[in-house]
Image (cartoon, helix red, strand yellow):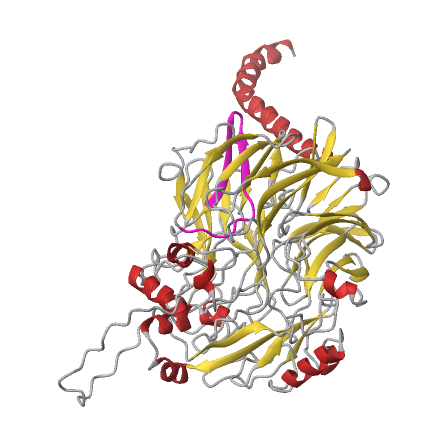
Amino acid sequence: MENKLSILYPTCCQMILRLLPLAFFFIVSCTGNLKEEATLQTGKDYPAYGGNKANNRYSPLTQIHAENVNNLAVAWTYFANDTINFPSRREIQCQPIVVDGVMYGTSAELNLFALDAATGEQLWKFEPKSEKLHANRGVMYWANGNDKRILYTAGPFLYAVNAVTGQLITSFGDQGKADLYEGLAGDIGHEVTNLYVGATSPGVIYKNTVVMGSTVSESGDAAPGYIRAFDVVTGKLKWVFHTIPLPGEPGYETWPADAYKKLGGVNCWGGMSVDEKRGVVYLGTGSPSSDFYGGAREGANLYANCILALDAETGKLKWYFQAIHHDLWDRDFPIPPNLTTITQNGKQRDVVAQAGKDGYIYVLDRDNGESIFPIEERPVPTDGLPGEHPYPTQKFVMKPRSLMNQLVTEDDLTDISPEANAFVKQRFHEFQKTESQFQPPSEQGTLLYGYSGGAEWGGNATDPEGILYQNANHAPWELTMISKEERDQELANLSPGHILYMKNCAPCHGADRTGNGNIIPALVNVGKKRSDDEIHQLIKMGNGMMPAFPYLSENNRKAIIGYLKNNEVIPPKAVSEHSDKVTAPTVKADFPYVPDYFVNTWQRFTDQNGYNAAKPPWGTLNAIDLNTGEYLWTVPIGEFPELTKKGIPITGTETYGGPVVTGSGLIFIASTRDERIRAFDKKTGKVMWEYQLPAGGFSTPITYEVNGKQYVAIAAGGGRGAKPGGWYIAFALK
């Protein structure tokens, strides 16, 4: 024994010495992970978009509860926007984060800031000076020792900023920024850098990998919406997942041959979640281009309108679930999946809960994508426009029931007054009879739900009991299509500026420039409200829901402005000496894709006073038990005071922005057109507290703790047709 020990002793010592560095790394890593886990458990920080990487929007904090919530008062305010350009019609949709007592968020101009989360004092501000402005809904935090970074998007770039100093980390990407066009071109055969590409929602970080979605056009000039990953440290592209498959990739057969060369979209714009234990990223995708006509994309169109599970390190597909085949209704997945755990038959089950614009909540097993509750595949109408190929079957979710009605029927029309009902009923009969929520678009016109909710980009919240809290819209829209030939005839005698307006602006603002309800403003008198420079900047850089139009030349933008202000300078038409000469037909290029049918009208279906044409409630907050698929309660959220004064029960309003739920049983949410933030009792749906914000809170509140005090904070950014804002406001107990 003694001799054996003497032989083994040096070898054992050598092994221990060799393992010491690994052990030290393991201890440091575990300590960091334990610290992060402890922080999440205490709720002191709100370190990620959605509260954590699972996007639960849950905080265990209990200092503010039902008995004292009425003692909430403003603790501090911070004005984030550029005061030189204020008032701005741009919105702040950002859900800020808090790490170690520091709040990070963005302004409407996409400036990044750091604040003392207890006082609102600005610590630093980073200004990217982006030429392409868009909504920004959040930022990402990553740290490794003293290397602490904020990653966020402005225009077509992903920036890495030192979280302590606010300075660019120049070793990341190209002098501090990675290009969001990278990885999109590949084999598609056309340039992408002149197309609209950005990211409204933050990505997710798994170890040293940041996974990004994107925002792209929804027309024939859409860039591909591939999912990409970058190295957090270097900014280098790590992998690409083709949401429109290339030849040889699974799903390629669900499109016509070479569809990837001329079609775009199928992007994740609503955000992602990551299961760090499994190393899997979960996300929902949107529809292919163009939105309402799919003549060039016969087939199911994988991976559009899908919930995807991807390996976070490699981008390899783990599984997919397609909710809608061959989407013709713009029914994207607009929010991140919520990763939670439910109990069934006495056993816990990890699930993905993904809400959609169609109002359904898909509850899927996290490992294989199988639905927890019954789903039926049924035949649907296929009488589409000429050249269209509506898919013959679609999924119908049995549980939970939809957040909204699926069909616009005569019984569903507004009842706020006899006059409103009569007006809406007359208009109702002008449209094609709708027999299914999957009725294909038509030239006669279709009334449908699914745009601007059920669920929208604000997200949802779940508590540890598996109860999901989701706000939802109940708003019908009217859609009419027009053929390319008819549109060309209409455009033939119009001025250049009018033509450009009809092609680029009319689908949202309307051919008559009257807008489509409260969200898309009327442009009839825009010349009296804005200068040429302001309109030019809006067209060039975008604004809130309005995308930028980078492909329009300077002269094209001037022509649109001239048309809008009724002072367009129209160049004389050249007269040919051989006007009767027959010219050769032009060859239609693959890209940009020019569909055979375009949107002619896409606007809210309203009464004569602009109120929702459906029967209230128009906006709701819902509690759904994901263990059973049953609703616990539904209440209206938001009100129109002028209707309430008339004795009309609270109708609810449009709701953009989401909830956060706390361990004390409160749900905090703003999101409504009446510009209030409220606290609801999570057991009953009763309003426990409300506060009139200085502007609309069309974002999602957060809650955190600093020095033993709990705060609730929200961006009161205004916009969406209401007055502008620009404040971040924090509340605490008096």
**Residue in front for this viewpoint, 571 or 397:** 571
Judge left or right: residue 66 versus residue 449.
right
Residue at 71% over, 57% down: 470
Residue 314: % across, % down: 49, 48
Q: Residue furthest front?
A: 528
The residue segment tinted magenta is 132-153
Q: Is residue 316 above or below residue 586?
A: above
Q: Is residue 726 left or right of residue 265?
A: right
Specify the quadrant that holds the N terminus: top right
Res. 249 visible in picture: no
* Residue 402 visible in the current orientation: yes
Question: Is residue 151 part of the magenta span, yes or no?
Answer: yes
Is residue 707 positioned above or below 265 on the image? above
Q: Nearer the viewer, residue 188 or 170?
A: 170
Residue toward you, 392 or 511: 511
Q: Quadrant of residue 640?
A: bottom right
Q: Is residue 315 magenta?
A: no
Does residue 38 appear left or right of residue 281 in this picture? right
Residue sitting at x 22%, y 75%: 572
Residue situated furthest bottom in the rendering: 580
